[in-house]
Image: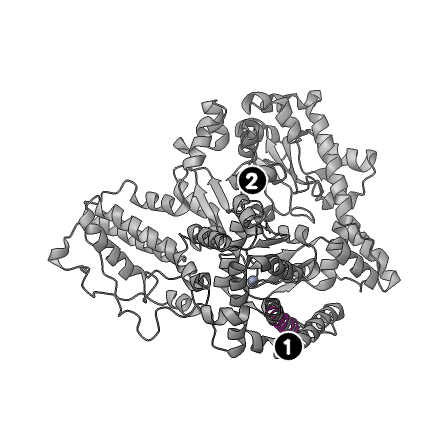
Amino acid sequence: MQIPRLHPDTIEAAQQRADIVDVISEHVVLRKRGKDFVGLCPFHDEKTPSFSVSPSKQMYYCFGCSAGGNAIKFLMEVGKRPFSEVVLDLCERYQVPVQTLEPEQRQQLQSQLSLREQLYETLAIAAQFYQHALRQSQGQLARSYLQSSRQLSEETIQQFGLGYAPVGWETLYRYLVEDKRQPVQLVEQAGLILPRKTGDGYYDRFRDRLMIPIHDIQGRVIGFGGRTLGDEQHASLREESISPQLAPKYLNSPETELFSKGKTLFALDKARVAISREDKAVVVEGYFDAIALHATGITNAVASLGTALSLDQVRQLLRYTESKQLLLNFDADAAGTQASVRAIGEIANLAYRGEIQLRILNLPEGKDADEYLKDKGDGGEQYRELLATAPLWLDWQIQQIVANQDLKQANQFQQVSQQLVKLLKLIDNPDTRNYYVRHCAELLSRGEDRLVSQYVENLLAQITPGKGWGSSGQGSRGAGEQRSRGEKRRGAISFSPRQSPQRGGIGAPSGDGGRPPHGAGSSPHPPLSPSSSPSRSLLEKAEASLLRIYLHCPEHRQAIVDILEEQDLQFSFSHHRFLWRQILEVSSTDSTQKAIDSVSTTQTQLDLISHLQVQCLEFESEIAQVSYLFHPDEKSQQEQMQRIPQVIQAATARMEQVLCEKRYRHFLELWQKTDGSTDPETSEYYYQEYNQAKLRSMKLQQQCQFSVCDLL
Ligand SMILES: [Zn+2]
C-alpha cells in the first residue's frame, strides 16, 4: 500500500513501544545468556550463535556478519521492507496512534489499517453464528457426526470452536448484513459470501457444512475450513441439486487480506506452548488429525492446510522449537513415498543442509492420525511410541530405497546403489554426509564387514567431485567448495554386488580409481581466522589478553564481565567466542561460582581451567586453538599483570572500535543503496546510524593509538 509520510512523533513512539526481544523472537529462536539473548543469525548461514540481542539497549548485533540495529532496522532487513511500512506495522501491533505529515492522507491510512480490524470482527461474528447453528435442531446431523464418527467430546468441540453452516443460500448473509449491519463488501472480503453471477445479490460460500475456524497465532479467526457431512455419497446427493461441482469434501476460505493458505498452520495457536515445551512439532495433514491429536493430549500438533509445507509455515514452527525438530505425519497410501516427498516440498533443502531435524512418521496400513488413534483407542500410547521412534528423513528415504530389494541380484544392487548415490549427493553438511556414506556402505555390504571400507571408498568416489570433505575439517564450507559441488562428478565407478576387493575391478582401497589427487593446489587447513592484517591481529591480541586475564586473575573477572556487558561487546574471533561461552557456562554452575567468587588463589585458577578442560573434552579442535591461554605466558605476564586495569581498558577499546567500524561501514553501504528521493526516512535513518558509529569509531581510534599498541 502507498504510505503517506509519517510524523516523527509516530516513528519515535513506535520505536519506543516496540520491544526488540519480542520482535526478533518471531524470527529467531533466542536463548538467554547473561542479560542478553543470543541466537542463530537470520542474515547469514551459521551453526553456532553469533547473533546477540540486548534488551537494555534495544539493539541487536551479529558478530559473524556485523548486521546490527534496532527493532525497526531488524524488520526492514529481515522482511526486505521499507521503513514506513515497518513503522506502521509496529504502530498497529503496539497500538501507537498514527500521525502523518499530510493530514488529508490520515483518514485514508486509518481506513487501510482498520480494514483488517473489521475483517477480524466480521469473521468472529460468523464463527459465533456457526457455533450457535451447531447447537440448533438444524445442526443435529453435524453434531452427531462430530460425536459418533469423530468421537469428539463437547469440550474438544468447544475448544476448537467447531460449528455448522446451515443449508440455504443466504442464512449467513442475512445474519451478518441485515441483523448485524456488517457492510456487504466487508463480508465479501472476508471470503464468506460470493456475488451471484446474475449480478443481483450474494450467496453464502459455506452451506450445509461442518465449520472449522482457522485462527492466527493470536487466536483470532482468519478463515474457515468447511467439511461436507458424512460420506461423499451423502454430500454429493445433498448438493447435487444445487451444483455438483461445488461439493468438494473440504472447502477452505479463499485467500483474503487475513488468510493465506500457504502461510497458515491450523491449530498453531493452540500448539505453540506445547511445541516449545517439548521442543518439537508434529505436522499432520488434516484438520481432524490435528484435533484428534489434541484431544488425545498430544498438543504439539498442527495441520498444514492440504498443501506442501512451505518455508513460511516451517519458519513459524521453528520459532518455537530450539532444536528445530519437525515430525511429519502425512498419509502414506500406496503412493505414500511420493506423497511424503511432495509434502516436504521446499523444506527438503533445509534438511539436507542440517538446518532442521526432519522426521517422518508413516502409520501402519496407510492410516491417518485420526483413524489410527480411534482404532487403537489406547489414549495415544502407541502413537506416542511411533513418534518417539520415527526415523530421520534421510534414514527414511534410505529405508524406502532399500525396501523390498534383493541386494544379491546384480540389477537390484545396481539400482539401489545408484539411488543411494543420488541421495548422498544432496546432503550438504559434510559431517552428516560422512555419516550416511558409512551407513549406506554398511547396508550394501550386508553384514560383510570386510566390504564396508571398500564401499565407503566407492561411494565417496561417486559423490565427491573434489577433495577434502571427508577429512575432519571444521565443517565450514568455503565458497570454493560450494561451487565445486555443482561440477560434474568424475568418471563414476559402478558397483557390482559383493565383488571382493582382491579381484580388482572396482577401486580397491589403495587404488586411485576415480579419486582425484588429494589437496592439489590449496592448503588442506586454511587458517580459521583471517589474521593477516595488522589491525586484525591487534584485535586478536586484545581479545586474547582479556581472556588470559580472566583465566588467571580472578580479582579482575568481575571488571571484565562488567565492561563487556556495559559496552555490549562480544569476541569477534570464533575460537575466542567459543572459549568465552564455555567460561560463562562453567561460571554459571553453582559450585564453581563459589570458587570463582572467592579470593584469588592458585587453587581457584586451576579450578576454572580444569573445569574448562573437562567441559571441552568433546570440542578437541576448538579448544586446541585457545588452550595456550590456559598457561600463563611467563615473560609477558610479569609486565602485563601490573597494568591490568589499563590492559582491560585498552583491549575493550580496541574491541569496541572494530565493532564501530563494522557498524559504520554496514550503514554506509545501506545508505548508499537507498534512494533518498523515494524513501527519505530510510535514507535519513541509515545516515544517522552511520554518522554516530563513525564518530564513535574515530574517538576510539585516537584512544587506541595511545594505549593499545603500547600495552597489548
Ligand atoms: Zn550474521
Residue 679 versus residue 335 in the image, above or below: below
Locate residue 418 relative to residue 568 in the image: left or right: left
Which residue is at a point 41% across and 36% down the rendered structure image? Answer: 389
The quarter in which the N terminus is drawn is: bottom right
Furthest-right residue in this view: 103
Residue 657 forms part of the magenta stretch: yes
Looking at the picture, tell me which residue is in the foreground, 195 or 10. Answer: 10
Instruction: Relative to 386, say whether 611 is above or below.
Output: below
Tell me, for residue 275, which label it has, or none. 2
- The tag on residue 701 is 1
Q: Is residue 626 visible?
A: yes
Q: Which mark is residue 106?
A: none
Look at the image and tell me whether residue 542 can be seen: no
Quadrant of the image for the C terminus? bottom right
Residue at screen point 57% across, 74% down: 711
Q: Main secondary structure of the magenta part?
A: helix
**Horizontal side, residue 515 vs residue 4: left or right:** left
Quarter of image, res 705: bottom right
Nearer to the camera, 524 or 585: 585
Quadrant field for ligand 1: bottom right
Asked whether, in this view, residue 251 is left or right of residue 121, the answer is: left
User: Which kind of residue does numbered mark 2 sit on?
Assistant: Ile
Residue 699 x/y as whole percent = 69, 76
State the extent of the magenta-drawn residues as a range. Answer: 655-668
Between residue 86 and residue 703, name the one nearer to us.
703
In the rendered view, would you say 597 is above or below 327?
Answer: below
Mark 2 or 1 closer to N-term? 2
